[in-house]
Amino acid sequence: MKTLQQDMTTGNPAKTILNFTFPIFIGNVFQQFYNMADTIIVGKFVGTKALAAVGSTGTIMFLIIGFVLGMTAGFTVLTAQKFGAGDMKAMRQTVGGAAVLSVLVSVVLTVLSMAFMKPLLRFMQTPSDIFADAYAYIMIICGGIFAQMLYNLLACVLRALGNSRIPLYFLILSAILNIGLDLLLIVGFGLGAAGAAYATVAAQGVSGLLCLLYIVKKVPLLHLEKEDWRPRHSLLKMQLGVGFPMALQYSITAVGTMMVQTSLNMLGSTAVAAFTAASKIEQVVTQAYVALGTTMATYCAQNIGAGKVLRIRQGFRAATLISAVYSVVVGAWILTGGKYMTYLFLSENVTEVLGLVGIYLRCAGIFFIPLAVVNIYRNGIQGMGYGLLPMTAGIVELAARGITAWIASGQRSYAGVCFAGPAAWVSAGLLLIGMYWYIMKHDMKKFMALHPQREEEQTEVKKHRKQKKGRKLPVCY
């Protein structure tokens, strides 16, 4: 068990981050693959309009699933902090509180999303020729919110303890299951877009149940007693204080992408299909940034719990360098050969769609570094316990994406719509870097003053200051 639960408060920061990130990255890619399986099989066996129907609900799916991801990640930030501090009793109490809150959120989110879905699709000007398929697909996804919540909560709990491998293994299994169910339900039973949704929900539910069985059988550290389920106002308040802003952060981003989707819908179903295929290609390579963000949330939470402030700064520096190197490599590929993955998604109108896919990928590929900054710094700051502050970056992101999409829709410009995402990344990234330096220079200095007993950290700080002597760089402490 020691090899699976990872203490991220010791060892080389760059190596620790890479070792934790890689399984999450592979898991995210597999998750994208079984989302892509829906798109590929629908596009190949049902047609362009069915592909557009699935794609037109992508931003709504991101709104729902993003809210779930934000909530579960936020609820377990405190879990990682208690684990880093070595307080296992309080750690189990945070897990019990997270479970209760997750059930309540699942019920509310399911009822609200299913009640308002049809008006939302109409508001987004979903083309009439794909409306029925789009509605059928997204309603099934809404009905499976509990399955999404189950897997993401348990995966976040395991990651909070430094275990990023087990969620990966179960995601791989569920990805394989999803592809098999896609072929059975779409090709075999002819269920079309609805079949893809059933396959996605079923696969997610299986991965959640596997995580639960693993915890019951293999992780005694997470075996909760009756006392651990008892609501504790102070812990629940702290969990909601981080979880709700993180969920809203995802929601704000999703609202921005919905504004983009609305502008895109005005350009017709061919543009929607091209944008859908291109975004799927982009999302596969950018899962590395999502994985680094998840890693930084756990890394910062454990280290703030242990009081190792200098190590947090070292982690941010290492993650930024890793992401910059990765961005150059994958950006070059996306700009040159990425568009040819379109052949995976379509068997008709490929020539017409291919050019539009290339435009999207060129717009996104040159801005991967700002996207990496957004994921790393937003999640890292949230892992340190700041819930509301990163939301301001989300508001800036929403404004930049919405204004760009609004201007593009007025000009009927597909390229302009494609630039909405990069405009949001650059705006939010600059603000988050400013937040990071402010927090490290002011708030973390106060944190260390309140914890003078942390002798090891104080020694590291003094050593760090001596190394920086004579420089005019800002000192964090």
Image (cartoon, rainbow, N blue to C red):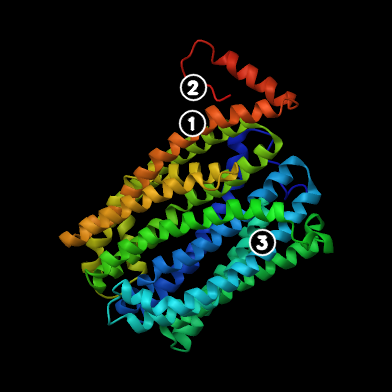
Q: Quadrant of residue 347?
A: bottom left
Q: Do the residues under discs 3 and 2 have CB atoms within 8 angstroms? A: no
Q: Residue furthest front?
A: 233
Q: Tell me the residue that label 3 is attached to.
A: 154
| Residue 209 in picture, x, y percent from top left | 68, 70
Identify which residue, 104 or 278, lies in the foreground: 104
Q: CA distance from mark 1 to mark 2?
A: 8 Å
Q: Label 1 amino acid? A: Trp
| Residue 180, disc | none
Q: Considering only order in the chain, which callout, 1 or 3, is on the residue closer to the N terminus?
A: 3
Q: Nearer the viewer, mark 3 or mark 1?
A: 1
Give the residue at x 51% y 62%: 67
Q: CA distance from mark 3 to mark 2?
A: 39 Å
Q: Do the residues under discs 1 and 2 have CB atoms within 8 angstroms? A: yes
Identify which residue, 314 or 309, lies in the foreground: 309
Q: Vertically, is 361 above or below 436?
A: below
Q: Label 2 amino acid? A: Pro
| Residue 474, disc | 2
| Residue 131 in picture, x, y percent from top left | 33, 81
Give the residue at x 24% y 58%: 406
